[in-house]
Amino acid sequence: MDIIIRKAELIKGLRSMGIRKGEHLMLHSSLKSIGYVQGGAKTVVDSLLQVLGDNGTLMVPTFTHSDTKYYDPRKSPSKNGAITEEVRKRPSSVRSLHPSHAVTVIGPDSNELVFNDLNCEPLGKGCALDILSKREGRILLLGVNQEVNSIIHVGEYYANDPDRHKLCSPDKPISIIINHPKHGEEVFLITSMMGKTIAFEQMENVLRKNGQIVYGKLGKALCQLMKASDVINATLDILKNDINDNLN
């Protein structure tokens, strides 16, 4: 029989990793990796919000990805798991308007984080996750690995990753209809989309070598906690070294 994971145990585990009140936290997660949680995703989100406190900020990916045809920020479900859906459905949450890579945020500066997302390249300069990194935000990987760590894409943007224009470009855009809360339905053109560089494969080893990862455990789930800015800087270093290796 599976051990029942309760809210008190989750809170203890989060605090033992050093997650503190008032901070900005981006969460990538797998609910099933934790084991049987009493109360499910609701308990996980309640635990995170209690640890972060009223002045803290919780961000989750609520992506619909580039293959979506219609995006309604109020109704389109997240494709990033049960915990992200729980955050998205909360009355206090704010979801960004980006039609393929929206995030959802709970916290006092939610609107400040998401306000410019629609004007940015997907996970590019100035997006909500980029702003979070500039506010000393951290990333928590809960039961998932670096393969889903979206802040790496922000680093790829700053590294001028050429793959951003392989899937689409100004000459070959992706068209998505947005049901804008203020303007109604309108067509939005995406002219760049992330690729996937070797930074995803190498990130954990680089951060661990630099002493920039805190490891922990919630139930059965292995966790990694790191500064968003460290991930961006590591991405730049990895891709710079890769270019130099290819030139030699």
Image: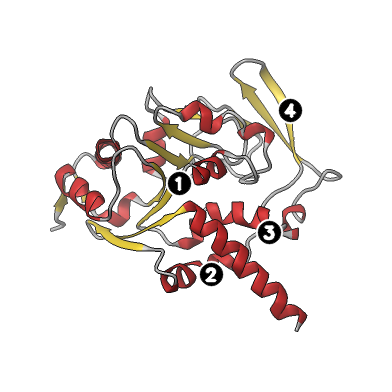
Q: Amino acid at mark 2?
A: Glu
Packing grade of label 1 (10 A; few <14, some 14-19, many >=20) is: some
Q: Disc 1 on helix, strand or loop?
A: loop
Quadrant hosting residue 43: top left
Q: Residue 65's x, y, as percent? A: 60, 44
Determine contact: label 4, label 2, CB under 8 Å: no
Query: Which of disc 4 and disc 1 is earlier in sequence?
Result: 1
Disc 4 crowd rating (10 Å Cα; few below 14, some 14-19, many 20+) is few
Nearest to viewer (mark 3 / mark 1)? 1
Find disc 3 in the rendering and name its residue.
159
Pick whichever of labels 3 and 1 is earlier in the sequence.
Answer: 1
Single out the mark in the foreground, 3 or 2: 3
**SS for tag 4?**
strand
Residue 172: x and y, percent?
A: 83, 45
Residue for badge 4? 187
Residue depicted at 49% across the width and 58% down the height: 230
**Which residue is at 56% across, 44% downward?**
130
**Callout 2: 10 Å neighbours few (<14), some, many (20+)?**
few
Question: How many angstroms separate mark 1 from mark 4 (CA)?
Answer: 34 Å
Q: At label 3, which amino acid type do we have? A: Ala
In what element is the residue under mark 2? helix
Checking the image for residue 136, the label placed there is 1
**Which residue sits at x=48%, y=52%?**
228
> Circle 3: is it few (<14), some (14-19), or many (20+) Cα within 10 Å?
some
Lower position in the chain sequence, tag 4 or tag 2 = 4
Which residue in the protein does label 2 denote?
201
Question: Which one is earlier in the sequence, the residue at label 3 or at label 2?
Answer: 3
208 vs 71, nearest the viewer: 208
Q: Secondary structure at mark 3?
A: loop
Percent x, y of residue 160: 72, 57
